[in-house]
């Protein structure tokens, strides 16, 4: 049984639960059933690539994708990120774009007042959360967005909600309250009567539930009303389920994605939590000889973050195949062009 550990690229984790996997006779590469570009990122890239050309350049505001190989390719086709509409204008762009994560309504206003054309690639599943947040605020709820306060998606949801009665939180300590309704005493701050919780689309359901339970305990006493809306998107849920399934079949997991890709780091973390030695890698050069030596005849599992293109995944599979691992029959996975996730 392998001891799970993280690479320098991987976020450190608590002690993993031990897992026993039957020894494998053949050294196989097992690819997660869901990996790489999610539906929303694929859609956003299709839109922007169709709209851009070296003569008709587009500046997405913020990182369009956390993958250096894709960023390089996009630059060649006329897509180059800028930090703001002003900066894009200063660099001679006439068109700006909203990335799949979405943005607040200010961006359209800024683009219009600067005379810039706007290309909106916001994922429809993110738009759904933005609209839901607005609706909950109109219904009188204080809106809590479970997620990373720095993330553009979370910032966008809060910007569309457009109220001071909202916040982002990942832990109870991040909330503006420190006590349950009805508790009294010096320094106690309790929630209002109505609180609603939505989630960043890429979060983990078990962690959302744990947070939700704690928040519910604070809100429900004394006639409080708590509403949980599970807005983790279907592609994220399927990816998390596929990773758990993968962990049952392999002895090492390589999570492929740009070094800045937090969702790839998260995949490696979940692999570790499943008791499998897991590493976040960007390129074949990141794979250390000792990882494979420690693996012996074990299988290697492959997963990839939502911003990792197929050819980068295929490159890692080919690299492993050259070292004697059997690649999956039929390539990394079929893509159904008609697939539309549940809204
Ligand atoms: Fe859309 Fe989900 Fe992908 Fe985000 S992770 S872009 S919500 S499909």
Image (cartoon, helix red, strand yellow):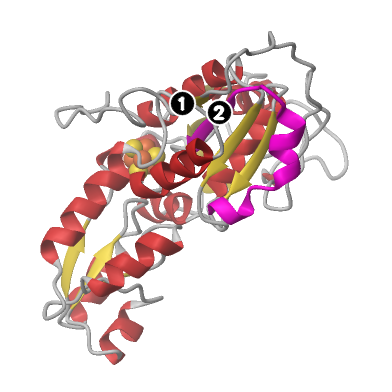
Depth check, front residue: 60 or 69: 69
Quadrant for the C terminus in the image? top left
**Residue found at x 43% / y 51%:** 153
Q: Which residue is mark 1?
A: 32
Q: Which segment did they paint magenta? A: 283-304
Q: Quadrant of residue 107?
A: bottom left
Q: Quadrant of residue 297?
A: top right
Judge left or right: residue 152 versus residue 266. left
Up the image or down, 34 lies above or below 82; here it is above
> Badges 1 and 2: C-beta atoms under 8 Å apart?
yes
| Mark 1 vs mark 2: in front | 2
Depth check, front residue: 148 or 237: 237
Q: Is residue 295 magenta?
A: yes
**Residue 227, visible in the rendered structure:** no
Depth check, front residue: 231 or 223: 231
| Quadrant of the rendered image holding ligand 1 | top left
* Residue 131 numbered mark, or none: none
Q: Is residue 220 magenta?
A: no
Where does the image place residue 212, in percent across and percent down from the top left? 61, 25
Up the image or down, 119 lies above or below 8; here it is below
Distance from Cα at disc 1 to Cα at disc 2: 7 Å
Q: Quadrant of residue 82?
A: bottom left
Up the image or down, 222 lies above or below 293; here it is above
Where does the image place residue 329, in percent across and percent down from the top left? 35, 22
* Residue 301 numbered mark, or none: 2
């Amino acid at each position: 049984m392998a001891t799970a550990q993280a690479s320098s690229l991987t976020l450190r984790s608590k002690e993993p639960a031990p897992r026993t996997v039957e020894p494998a006779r053949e050294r196989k590469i097992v690819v997660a059933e869901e990996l790489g570009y999610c539906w929303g990122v694929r859609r956003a890239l299709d839109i922007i690539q169709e709209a851009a050309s070296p003569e008709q350049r587009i500046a997405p505001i913020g990182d369009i994708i956390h993958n250096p190989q894709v960023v390089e390719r996009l630059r060649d086709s006329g897509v180059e990120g800028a930090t703001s509409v002003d900066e894009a204008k200063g660099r001679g762009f006439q068109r700006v774009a909203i990335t799949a994560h979405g943005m607040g309504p200010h961006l359209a206003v800024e683009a219009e007042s600067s005379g810039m054309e706007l290309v909106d690639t916001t994922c429809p599943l993110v738009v759904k959360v933005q609209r839901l947040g607005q609706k909950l605020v109109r219904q009188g709820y204080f809106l809590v967005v479970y997620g990373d306060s720095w993330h553009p998606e979370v910032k966008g949801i809060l910007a569309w909600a457009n109220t001071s009665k909202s916040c982002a939180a990942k832990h109870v300590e991040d909330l503006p309250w420190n006590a349950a309704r009805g508790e009294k005493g010096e320094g106690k701050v309790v929630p209002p009567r109505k609180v609603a919780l939505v989630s960043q689309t890429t979060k983990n359901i078990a962690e959302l539930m744990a947070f939700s339970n704690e928040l519910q305990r604070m809100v429900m006493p004394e006639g409080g009303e708590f509403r949980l809306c599970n807005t983790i998107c279907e592609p994220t849920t399927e990816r998390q389920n596929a990773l758990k399934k993968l962990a049952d079949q392999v002895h090492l997991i390589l999570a492929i994605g740009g070094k800045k890709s937090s969702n790839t780091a998260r995949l490696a973390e979940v692999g570790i939590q499943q008791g499998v030695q897991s590493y976040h890698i960007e390129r074949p050069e990141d794979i250390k000889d000792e990882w494979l030596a420690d693996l012996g005849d074990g299988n290697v599992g492959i997963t990839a973050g939502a911003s990792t293109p197929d050819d980068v995944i295929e490159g890692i599979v080919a690299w492993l195949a050259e070292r004697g691992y059997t690649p999956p029959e039929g390539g990394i996975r079929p893509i159904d062009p008609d697939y539309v996730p549940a809204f």
